[in-house]
Amino acid sequence: MSVIKQVRTRYAPSPTGFMHVGNLRTALYEYLIAKSQGGAFVLRIEDTDRERYVEGAVDVIYNTLKTAGITHDEGPDVGGDYGPYVQSERKDMYTPYAEQLIKEGKAYRCFCSRERLEKLAETSEFGGYDRHCRDLTQEEIDEELKKGTPFVIRQKMPVDGKTTFKDEVFGEITVDNSELQDQILVKTDGYPTYNFANVIDDHTMGITHVVRGSEYLSSTPKYNLLYEAFGWEIPTYVHLPLIMGKNEDGSVSKLSKRHGSTGFEDLIEDGYLPEAIINYIALLGWCPKDNREIFSMKELEENFFIGGISKSPAVFDYDKLLWMNAEYIKAMSDEEFTERAVPYYKEALGDKEFDYAMFAGILKQRTEKFTDIPEKIRFFAELPEYDKELFVNKKSKTNLDNSPALLTEAYERLKALDSWDHDSIHDCLINMAQEKELKNGTVMWGVRIAAAGQKVTPGGAIEILDILGREESLSRLEKGIEKLK
Ligand code: GLU
């Protein structure tokens, strides 16, 4: 009887202080592969590369996952049965495994000096380490150990034959073993290399699916030789396609800063919503069965499947992300929109008093990113300087001859209103148009220009007057009349 193992995936970031969208996608897919199969998603911090270590970078990882809604079941902060979840805290675990391989003749100590290796790198036609210490005698080894010569531990790679493995996305991959170096497993400082640690960690943490960028494809045969050396079961591999950016000339190249923001925090700063970024990134290399585009995290958890991941490079399309962002904004309730827009209202309006709830009506359908809001509504805080030519509009049949009288009459009628709200302003201006047998636009145009002081506004004359309130509206119309004189 075969026992079905619980799916366990891990996200294993190195704390470098920056969450590239590619890393975020890896985390998301790992999460979704686990969740779509009732499995567990583990966070493991890979901080053994001390040279790359950046202070505070672990917090960036926690914050990003939290904001993105990718919740880990196990990790340094939440614990779990397979800890510790930080590689540097596992430091002492690795060497015994390497020593086991030495004992079994599958690994060896290499005492070569840095100078020798550097020289070798320059001259060797072997293209790397020449296996100098692979066959030292026990006496030679003991002597070096006695002298205290620093050493690394290297894996003995097979020198002939082939290694084949299957990747769920890229299919079957075969390499000649002769291409594989005797890779370092443990460095002179006692720290494991990434290549060694990730295998030990994935095995001891019960990881069933290893999901990572396709740049790791070429290293995977080495990992498999380690699994085999230990007699461990090889995990399911899911390597993800590259993420490309569109160049100005229409070609594509690996996504980088010159294409736009590439970090999660930068995208947030640009005004994209976490849920839109996640939705967009989910589709960056994965295709659902029905070509649907909008997915909440919960829906992704229900729909994700490994077979939908494509091996062809995915192109990051900022226009598409913007479209998706706007869709998310449109789908918000007015209350939610207002809540999230408040900081942008404050940015544009300072401490001027407005009923913020009124803005959703004119902005929600017209906002692609929240960061666009301040620019759109700044005129509410202060009437911009404007040219009276703005009163001229062919389509609305307004010109500098008819505008003074039209605006003056609209002003008088508005001033006479008992109450100041959307309906009364609406009825007042529409009645004026009807009574005078004019197009609505002929009346509205000048009122809107005078109220906003600019040609393009979110919302029409009625909404703008309503938000500005009676006093400010009438004062702006007076200024317009003055300008037209
Ligand atoms: N620490 C590696 C990285 O950040 C993880 C690679 C892997 O998932 O195995 O690239």
Image (cartoon, grey):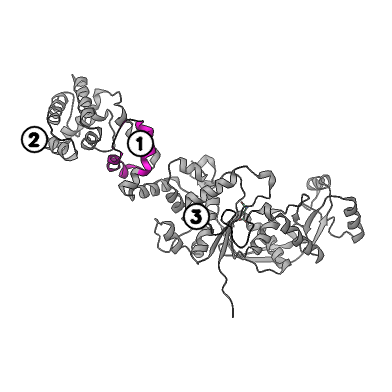
Mark closer to the chain start, 2 or 1: 1
**Residue 437: image tag:** 2
Which mark lies nearer to you, 2 or 3? Answer: 3
In this view, 414 is above or below 232: above
Amino acid residing under circle 3: Ile
Q: On the picture, is 399 further left or further right than 455?
A: left
In the orientation shown, which residue stands out farthest toward the bottom? 1
Q: Is residue 345 magenta?
A: yes
Residue 345 badge: 1
The label on residue 377 is none
Magenta-drawn stretch, dominant element (helix, strand or loop): helix
In the depicted view, which residue is nearer to us: 394 or 36? 36
Between the C-alphas of marks 2 and 3, the distance is: 60 Å
Does 310 appear in magenta? no
Q: Is residue 157 left or right of residue 441?
A: right
Magenta stretch bounds: 339-368
Quarter placement of the N terminus: bottom right
Helix, strand or loop status at disc 3: loop
Would you identify the image quadrant in which residue 300 lies?
bottom left
Which element is circle 2 on?
Answer: loop
| Residue 25 point in image, percent of width and height | 52, 53
Q: Amino acid at mark 2?
A: Glu
| Residue beneath disc 3 | 70
Q: Is residue 171 above or below residue 473?
A: below
Front position among marks 2 and 1: 1
